[in-house]
Amino acid sequence: MSYSHRDRRHLERLRVHLQPLERKGVIDLWDDTRLLPGSNWASEIADAIETAKVAILLVSADFLASSFIVENELPPLLAAAQRGGAAILPVVVGACRFTSTPELSVFQSANDPIRPLAALPFAERERVWARVGDAIEAAFVDRNPTDGWMVANERRVVGSLNELVNSKPGSFLIVSSGDHYVQFVLESDVLHCEAVSNAYLPKNLRLSDKQQARIVAAGFAKPTEDIGNFSRRYQLKQVRAELPSVAKMVVSVLSEIYQVSKNSRLEVQLTLEGESVQA
């Protein structure tokens, strides 16, 4: 992590949000607090940059004003990003010239640069830090950090799908956001999947012809008189090995076709033998 010492309070809060990933061994968080007195700081910083998977930049006016950061930390980080090494993840923590700094603004920030963390109420700041954690997790499964929301929700969906396919027939799972949903029903040897159609959507949320065509292109059959939603079926024996790709499809359909906001949290409702489980 690269930051100005004047912004240390933001570093400390980010550490709290990343602690679960550290505890599970997903990440090894490095910043200059790990430098010991008398150590070769230049060599240690260079080694950390060379091996970094993600570089988090806590950007502020103090960050941009720091000669040490601009001359010693940013050049090797940006060079590593150009080589396909570290993914750069800026977090704009204070009002500054981030958008006027082309070598940084080329990277998508975790938050809206015109609404820096210092200007946000506590609850919104916490949501930004949570998104940073999701982005880091995405990078560590070889996805773009901008896919953080999708990766986090895919993980929740795949966990519930795994429980569903190992339960008794009649159990079901609903993944939803407001009126939009994708649902699964477990049959004896088949996993039945449905995506909501216009028949069950309010007028202001109905799908365009293009959106409906995209659902069909994703592998769903068109609604019929018997099945009012878009539907598809998975053979139970085969789908057990395909749950990650099924979960990815669900989140993709909801976010890219139904256009569910990535600022929202998907509801994952699993019902097993009459018991409801919320993930």
Image (cartoon, rainbow, N blue to C red):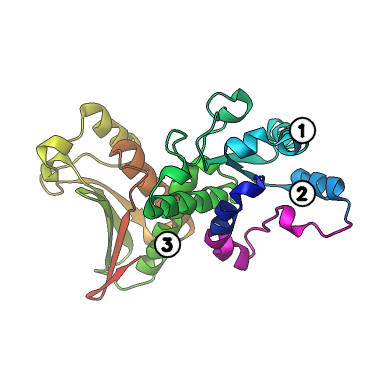
Q: Secondary structure at mark 3?
A: helix
The numbered disc on residue 48 is 2
Q: Nearer the viewer, residue 110 or 248?
A: 110
Q: Which of disc 2 and disc 3 is earlier in sequence?
A: 2
Relative to residue 166, is residue 34 drawn left or right?
right
Closer to the camera: disc 3 or disc 1? 1
Query: Label 2 sits on what residue type?
Result: Ala
Residue 24 visible in the shown view: no
The numbered disc on residue 57 is none
Q: Nearer the viewer, residue 142 or 40?
A: 40
Query: Label 3 sits on what residue type?
Result: Lys
Query: Label 1 sits on what residue type?
Result: Glu
Q: Secondary structure at mark 2?
A: helix
Mark 1, other Cα within 10 Å: few <14 / some 14–19 / many ≥20? few
**Residue 79 percent across, percent down from the top left:** 74, 32
Alpha carbon of mark 3 to alpha carbon of mark 1: how far?
57 Å
**Residue 23 percent across, percent down from the top left:** 61, 68
Q: How many marks?
A: 3
Q: Are marks 3 and 1 in contact (CB under 8 Å)?
A: no
**Residue 108 percent across, percent down from the top left:** 52, 34
- Is 179 in the magenta? no
* Disc 3: which residue: 237
Relative to residue 129, is residue 120 drawn left or right?
left
User: In percent of the image, x 31 and y 52: which residue is there?
Assistant: 233
Alpha carbon of mark 3 to alpha carbon of mark 2: how far?
45 Å
* Disc 1: which residue: 71
Mark 2, other Cα within 10 Å: few <14 / some 14–19 / many ≥20? some
Q: Secondary structure at mark 1?
A: helix
**Residue 148 percent across, percent down from the top left:** 49, 47
Relative to residue 207, is residue 115 drawn left or right?
right
Q: Magenta span covers which residues?
A: 15-38
User: In percent of the image, x 55 and y 30: which residue is there?
Assistant: 98
